[in-house]
Amino acid sequence: MVKNARWIFALLLALAVVSCSKPPPQPAPSTIVLLVRHAEKASDAEDSPLTEAGTQRSQALVRVADAAGVSAIYTTQFKRNRDTAQPLSERLKIAVTESPIKDIQNPGDYAKTLAREITEKHAGQTVLVVGHSNTIPLMLEALTGQPAPADHAEYSDLFIVTVPPSGPARLIKAQYGTGGPK
């Protein structure tokens, strides 16, 4: 009986040592979504290019997002959005994923679909989304579950959404580049 007790004690001691040597499981990383409006556009034409100020802002975006660990970039089908993302895409050597808005007048489904794609396909990664004054608040709401801030139309706004694997998302509003017209 004493031999069995010693054997059981030795087994329990070995199991305790093994269980203590394993590090605790690490929580899954949060998904970070950087949301910006396209930079300043040259006209009200549907597919307007950027102005010189817009080109400068796209360079400012590189300076802000270069070290953020961006692993995916999404834009709509419009030239101003692609041109806003292009300098960062080139710097990071990441292709831009074009996610067209099918119904410009009602972009709500677009925002929900894109938010779901990002959180599923890029879980734990950092993603840049270049949107529009009417899609940014909808994306913020889709990602956070909360109404978007009222002042969402500035070209210089940078919204940083942290989406943890569980629990509520967090939103930080920052600025990048120099101020400019809406």
Image (cartoon, helix red, strand yellow):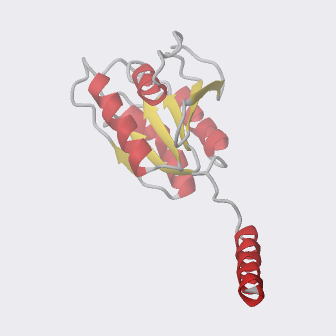
Q: In this view, does 120 lie to the left or right of 54?
A: left
From the top left corner, tell me how far across and down residue 117 is, in percent: 36, 43
Give the residue at x 56% y 55%: 92
Q: Which residue lies furthest to the front in this view?
A: 1
Q: Return the residue nearer the eye: 126 or 27.
A: 27
From the top left corner, tell me how far across and down residue 1 is, in percent: 72, 86
Tell me where residue 46 sits by quadrant.
Answer: top left
Q: Residue furthest top?
A: 150
Give the residue at x 31% y 35%: 113
Q: Return the residue nearer the eye: 27 or 4.
A: 4
Give the residue at x 59% y 49%: 29
Give the residue at x 40% y 50%: 121
Q: In this view, does 161 lie above or below 155?
A: below
Q: Can residue 159 be seen in this view?
A: no
Q: Is residue 88 above or below residue 56?
A: below
Tell me where residue 173 sits by quadrant.
Answer: top right
Q: Is residue 138 visible?
A: yes
From the top left corner, tell me how far across and down residue 133 is, in percent: 43, 19
Q: Return the residue nearer the eye: 49 or 105.
A: 105
From the top left corner, tell me how far across and down residue 15 is, in percent: 70, 75
